Image (tube, coloured by chain):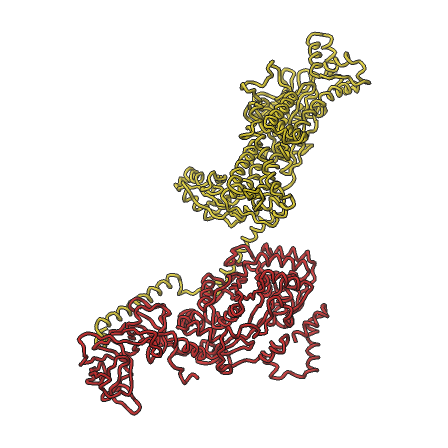
Chain colours: A yellow, B red
């Protein structure tokens, strides 16, 4: 420096500046060198290591790709709709597994978000995991931290656009627009398809099940409606469904009925007796049974002869049953119910073997001449043979259970029976497990219980005179009320007589069914024509009206089905408007709703969903023009095809929902 | 040879390739006799097959100087029918264009879409930096469109996922704009991946492509065996191609190949291959990527390019270009080839530049000794100079190999018009004027362009203390030396004064440290023999002086440089002058601003400049170094 200073011909000042600049430069070089050394720059990466790194990256990429392809293949091969919720559960399951590999059964909670600002779905597992860590390992980790760790481990997927962590540890999921749009297109192209389902399974549904010679009453209404919907749901989900009407067609009452028949219509074997009113006939015989000792004795003989399958007695029995069958069928026709008859008599021959099986396995105790079976966990035993040697409901229900499991090979058995039968059925199911007919881990046997129907006074549903309400009368009143309503709204002036009639039945029976199905079946429900026919709120009337309106949108824009189908293949469904996006997501929740019902058998979820879909649609329709018209001339200026496609997708899903609920929409109403 | 083989293969599809080759070789030998040295030269082969007679004459390698002073503007050269290019929509009039039953309908449709406009594209691979060779492509494509009222696309050919980085994309666009062109649209080959995939399926369905499992090594080199999978059922290929897309095949285990023979006899070029590499733009959407052969013509077709201009290496791919468009019944553009522009004394390949950067021979991709476009910009070459250079090289189909001094001459021409004068002293010697006529500094007016004083003046201070070049003073003036020496006064540029040495101050070693001089107004003094430049109250700056990076014309040629290009580096290619001084008129100059430093050359402000320490690059000297010519 000294030399520099002295030798420098320039001013001292300039010299010092140069010197500083020189030093600064030196410092820069040294800092860079240190940086390089810190990053192992000195080691130099061996070529083989670099090669291995490259290969590793490629393998990872391929693995990811294969996973994606597998996912794609799974969903595509079935053309099925994707259950987004369960896909997200899978993804978060994997993320949690990766983040906390040694946690057993970590809680996995994924739900749709209630507000758009919380994304589309949210995973709320972090709070639960925090609790578990605290309890089982005494680790204090704040849920937010856990949420972050989970979020970091989310595997590559085609659903999620991004995730955000909010509040104490909610993971908010934003779905990818292109994914939702693609799913909607596929829905439009392939129609509403059930979620992918492995091997074809069989469901046996026991429902309706009235008694012969007794009128169907409002109590049977619930079992019939719920059972029918349940069958439709399982059929849609790809099950083979066996719909069984477990008729009460085999009991002591047939002795007195046959005895009375023989007295009243001695030539019943050749000439069909004109029993118009079986209920009155039943009352007459019952009165004789209670008052005439001789008649009573003969009635018992008749039972024995019937059970020994004496042809004359079988004939008489059939005659009586036929009368009932005709009455039942009227109701099934009204309600569009399909069911096969397999009453108690069907199992008669099997009961002997059932008893033997229980005896052979040492489950039978004899108590006061009765043969009883105690089932662990149930205080009251099953009586399988009475002291007089006859069989009971317990015996026939056991026989039916075994037949459905072992002969029909049902994978899932559903009993749509009122809650009053709960203990009885649970005991039967437990006995079936005890004796080894089924393993609940493999086969599902469920009692879909339901509450009673109440009148508007919140008491048991009766006529004004206090009688049980006959179902057929109720349906007829429904028809009348529906027509009144339609006329009130002056629909008779708009619709053709045929359309009016169609609207009437659709509304009447649709409303009765929907009113039943839209309530949690476990609760009692209040039967009110006024409420169910109201066209506002969560009613069939509202939904049917909304549906016809949606269907009319395309029609009024002169877009026919073929054009829609073509557009579905070619147009991309843009979901840029907030309401379009909301509606799109709502439509795609259909599979997850169905999945939930398949699990808990609570059909009101579907009604709630359809109602939500209809209101979401209204929001969309109110803020997004589907068809733009000239205000003056009313001429169509522009058709926003992708929005019409959204209408179409909504309608398609609603139609499928109606179909499952057993509601028939009409073209115009 | 290739053509013959191709033809033979087509006719004898199931015959053993090796046997055919032997037989054809034998017959050719009979016919033509043994190969001469001339036959072993590569270049003429390219021209053999398809050129029209008119073009044929132009095919020759133009060396420097041949082009002389042809200075027709590029636009003039490109305008109208000068090139014998077809009119939009009249593709079929081009020799060699393949007309199918659908051609006319497709051309009609094409015209409806373009409205008869000329459409070209500049399609660089975004995996490196543009160099002087690309400048020709840019000028040709953009220029041809501009000259004919058309449009030009900037299309990144990003089919290869391995090497693409964001910085390349932005740098390319920047360079195109720097040269003065605006792309009509910026597109990417990857924009069309979906369409390309759909077409690949269609190609399979039409029986024109198949999935092949030959290994890369098997189909390399001369006369590879034909694919045993060539005739597999369409359904099978469709399924396997789907499997390729799904990642079921490893890299190299399956390719999609097109059923055609190329000009050089190469059979069945690959259309798609498996690569487990994410793509810069499509992310992890694909694990199969299309090849150049498959992508290029289809992208041109999608964009309705009228003239697909490319360098002559691609002539061998012309037939596959036409074949593929026709196999899919899509609009088929016309491919036209032009000669490549090569520059002596440099390397432009990406890999070699990387080596130069890694070994520290150059600082980075834009080191002013390189001939990448960013380097040229940094060195101070104006874009007009580069465009003029391209114009002089011309748009002929000839391959041109140029010396850098021609480019430098172009730069001088432009800079002479553009770069204002300033004065700088590289090796300063302090001079004190003992009889300075004023107590403070005077102001001197210097014309920005002495040849045209209407372009203004700038002021520089003239103080008692000035600095001149050390080399402008000698203690003893020999014959022929005209500048300052004791007893030999010299004029100071622009001041109107002549100085005379009064006293020479030396240090102990006898080195001249400072001069004391007296000054005389030039109108009273005797006319000095010379005028020198000077600075007063100057700014300190760093000046970088550049020479050729390589010593030999063709550093890559092993016969010229047996040790490889890295052994050919010129040790004096960069000289940094740390303590240069420059007059204060350049104080507020920005990077890339250009000046003519009197008597020294053209200089450009380097982006390394900092507050208080400007850095200048010498673009070119004022005159061509006679040693270089």
Tally of numbered discs? 0
Residue drawn where x is 58% and y is 38% of the image: A550
Residue B10 coordinates in the image, percent (x, y): 70, 69
| Residue B413 drawn above or below residue B148 | below
State the residue lying farthest toward the right: A270
Task: Judge by depth and name the residue closer to the eye, A349 or B139.
Answer: B139
Query: Camera-side residue: A128 or A52?
Result: A128
Quadrant where the image shows the C terminus of chain B: bottom left
Residue B293 percent location from the top left of the image: 59, 66
Quadrant assignment, res B179: bottom left
In the rendered image, is residue A279 in sight?
yes
| Residue A205 falls in image quadrant | top right
The residue positioned farthest toward the front in the image shown: A632
Considering depth in this image, is A27 or A36 the residue closer to the camera? A27
Query: Is residue A393 in sight in this rendering?
Result: no
A38 left or right of B27? left
Question: Does residue B437 appear left or right of residue B352 in this picture?
Answer: left
Q: Position of residue A312 (x, y in %)?
A: 79, 18
- Compared with A265, B567 (above or below) is below
Above or below for A7 versus B329: below
Q: Residue B142 at x, y = what percent?
A: 51, 68
Quadrant in the picture for the N terminus of chain B: bottom right
Q: Is residue A263 positioned above or below B92 on the image? A: above
Q: B128 or A36, which is in the foreground?
A: B128
């Amino acid at each position: 420096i000294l030399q520099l200073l002295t030798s420098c011909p320039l001013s001292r000042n300039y010299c010092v500046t140069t010197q500083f600049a020189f030093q600064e430069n030196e410092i820069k070089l040294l800092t860079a060198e240190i940086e390089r050394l810190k990053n192992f720059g000195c080691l130099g990466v061996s070529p083989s290591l670099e090669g291995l790194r490259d290969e590793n990256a490629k393998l990872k990429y391929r693995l990811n790709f294969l996973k994606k392809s597998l996912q794609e293949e799974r969903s595509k091969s079935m053309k099925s709709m994707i259950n987004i919720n369960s896909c997200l559960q899978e993804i978060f399951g994997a993320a949690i597994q990766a983040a906390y590999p040694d946690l057993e059964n970590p809680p996995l909670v994924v739900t749709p978000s209630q507000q758009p600002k919380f994304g589309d779905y949210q995973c709320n597992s972090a709070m639960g995991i925090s609790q578990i860590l605290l309890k089982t390992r005494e680790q204090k980790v704040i849920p937010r931290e856990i949420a972050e760790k989970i979020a970091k481990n989310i595997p590559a997927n085609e659903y999620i656009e991004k995730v955000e962590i909010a509040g104490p540890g909610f993971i908010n999921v934003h779905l990818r627009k292109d994914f939702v749009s693609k799913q909607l297109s596929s829905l439009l192209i392939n129609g509403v398809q059930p979620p992918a389902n492995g091997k074809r399974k069989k469901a046996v549904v026991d429902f309706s099940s009235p008694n012969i010679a007794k009128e169907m009453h409002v109590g049977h209404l619930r079992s019939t409606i719920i059972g029918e919907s349940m069958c439709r749901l399982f059929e849609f989900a790809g099950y083979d469904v066996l719909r069984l009407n477990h008729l009460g067609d085999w009991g002591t009452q047939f002795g007195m009925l046959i005895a009375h028949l023989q007295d009243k219509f001695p030539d019943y074997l050749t000439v069909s007796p004109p029993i118009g009113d079986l209920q009155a006939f039943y009352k007459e015989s019952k009165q004789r049974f209670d008052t005439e000792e001789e008649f009573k004795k003969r009635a018992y003989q008749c039972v024995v002869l019937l059970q020994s399958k004496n042809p004359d007695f079988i004939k008489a029995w059939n005659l009586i049953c036929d009368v009932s069958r005709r009455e039942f069928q009227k109701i099934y026709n009204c309600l569009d119910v399909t069911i096969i008859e397999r009453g108690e008599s069907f199992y008669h021959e099997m009961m002997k073997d059932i008893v033997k099986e229980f005896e052979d396995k040492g489950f039978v105790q004899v108590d006061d001449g009765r043969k009883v079976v105690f089932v662990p966990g149930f205080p009251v035993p099953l009586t399988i043979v009475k002291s007089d040697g006859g069989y009971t409901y317990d015996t026939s229900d056991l026989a039916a259970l075994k037949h459905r499991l072992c002969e029909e090979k049902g994978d899932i058995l559903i009993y749509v029976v009122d809650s009053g039968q709960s203990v009885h059925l649970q005991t039967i199911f437990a006995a079936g497990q005890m004796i080894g007919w089924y393993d609940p881990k493999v086969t599902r046997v469920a009692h879909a219980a339901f509450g009673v129907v109440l009148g508007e006074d919140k008491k048991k549903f009766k006529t004004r005179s206090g009688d049980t309400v006959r179902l057929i009368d109720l349906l007829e009143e429904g028809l009348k009320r529906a027509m009144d309503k339609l006329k009130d709204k002056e629909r008779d002036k708009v619709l053709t007589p045929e359309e009016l009639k169609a609207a009437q039945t659709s509304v009447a029976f649709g409303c009765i069914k929907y009113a039943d199905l839209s309530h949690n079946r476990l609760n009692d429900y209040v039967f009110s024509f006024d409420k169910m026919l109201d066209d506002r709120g969560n009613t069939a009337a509202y939904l049917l009206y909304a549906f016809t309106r949606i269907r009319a949108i395309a029609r009024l824009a002169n877009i026919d089905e073929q054009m829609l189908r073509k557009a579905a293949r070619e147009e991309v469904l843009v979901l840029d408007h907030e309401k379009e996006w909301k509606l799109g997501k709502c439509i795609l929740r259909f599979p997850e709703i169905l999945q939930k019902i398949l699990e808990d058998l609570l059909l009101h979820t579907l009604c709630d969903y359809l109602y939500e879909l209809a209101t979401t649609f209204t929001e969309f329709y109110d803020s997004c023009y589907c068809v733009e018209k000239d205000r003056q001339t009313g001429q169509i200026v522009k058709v926003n095809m992708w929005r019409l496609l959204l209408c179409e997708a909504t309608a398609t899903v609603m139609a499928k929902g109606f179909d499952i609920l057993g509601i028939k929409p009409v073209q115009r109403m | 040879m290739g053509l013959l083989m191709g033809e033979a293969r087509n006719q004898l599809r199931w015959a053993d390739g090796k046997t055919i080759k032997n037989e054809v070789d034998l017959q050719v030998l009979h016919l033509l006799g043994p190969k001469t040295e001339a036959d072993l030269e590569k270049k003429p082969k390219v021209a053999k097959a398809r050129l029209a007679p008119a073009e044929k004459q132009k095919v020759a390698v133009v060396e420097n100087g041949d082009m002389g002073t042809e200075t027709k503007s590029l636009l003039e050269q490109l305008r109208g029918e000068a090139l014998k290019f077809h009119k939009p929509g009249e593709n079929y009039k081009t020799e060699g264009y393949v007309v199918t039953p659908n051609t006319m309908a497709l051309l009609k449709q094409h015209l409806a879409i373009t409205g008869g406009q000329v459409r070209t594209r500049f399609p660089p691979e975004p995996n490196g930096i543009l160099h002087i060779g690309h400048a020709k492509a840019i000028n040709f494509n953009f220029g041809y469109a501009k000259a004919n009222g058309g449009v030009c696309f900037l299309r990144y050919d990003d089919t290869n996922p391995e090497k693409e980085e964001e910085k390349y994309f932005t740098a390319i666009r920047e360079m195109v704009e720097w040269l003065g062109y605006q792309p009509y649209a910026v597109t990417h080959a990857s924009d069309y991946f979906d369409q390309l995939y759909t077409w690949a399926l269609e190609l399979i369905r039409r029986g024109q492509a198949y999935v092949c499992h030959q290994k890369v090594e098997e189909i390399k080199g001369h006369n590879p065996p034909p694919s045993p999978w060539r005739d597999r059922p369409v359904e099978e290929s469709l399924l396997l191609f789907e499997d390729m897309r799904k990642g079921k095949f490893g890299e190299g285990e399956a390719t999609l190949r097109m059923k055609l023979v190329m000009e050089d006899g190469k059979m069945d070029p690959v259309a798609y291959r498996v690569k487990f590499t994410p793509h810069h733009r499509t992310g992890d959407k694909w694990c199969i990527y299309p090849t150049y052969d498959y992508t290029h013509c289809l992208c041109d077709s999608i964009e309705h390019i009228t003239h697909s201009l490319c360098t002559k290496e691609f002539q061998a791919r012309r037939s596959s270009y036409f074949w593929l468009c026709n196999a899919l019944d899509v609009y088929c553009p016309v491919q036209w080839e032009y000669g490549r522009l090569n520059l002596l004394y440099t390397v432009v390949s990406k890999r070699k530049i990387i080596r130069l950067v890694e070994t520290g021979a150059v600082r980075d991709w834009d080191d002013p000794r390189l001939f990448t476009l960013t380097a040229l910009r940094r060195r101070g070459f104006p874009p007009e100079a580069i465009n003029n250079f391209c114009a002089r090289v011309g748009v002929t189909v000839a391959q041109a190999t140029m010396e850098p001094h021609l480019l430098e001459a172009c730069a001088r021409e432009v800079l002479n018009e553009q770069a204002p004068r300033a004065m700088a002293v590289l090796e300063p010697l302090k001079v004190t004027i003992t009889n300075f006529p004023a107590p403070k500094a005077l102001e001197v007016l210097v014309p920005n362009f002495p040849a045209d004083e209407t372009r203004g003046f700038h002021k520089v201070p003239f103080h008692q203390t000035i600095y001149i070049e050390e080399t402008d003073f000698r203690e003893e003036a020999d014959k022929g030396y005209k500048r300052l020496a004791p007893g030999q006064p010299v004029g100071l540029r622009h001041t109107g004064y002549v100085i005379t040495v009064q006293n020479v101050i030396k240090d102990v070693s006898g080195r001249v440290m400072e001069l004391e001089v007296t000054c005389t107004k030039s109108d009273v003094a005797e006319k000095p023999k010379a005028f020198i430049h000077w600075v007063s109250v100057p700014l300190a700056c760093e000046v970088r002086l550049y020479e050729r990076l390589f010593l030999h014309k063709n550093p890559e040629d092993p016969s010229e440089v047996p040790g490889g290009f890295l052994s050919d580096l010129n040790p004096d290619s960069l000289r940094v002058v740390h303590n240069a001084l420059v007059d204060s008129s350049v104080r507020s100059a920005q990077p890339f601003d250009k000046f003519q430093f009197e008597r020294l050359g053209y200089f450009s402000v380097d982006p390394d400049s900092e507050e208080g320490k400007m850095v200048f690059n010498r673009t070119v000297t004022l005159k061509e170094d006679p040693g270089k010519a």
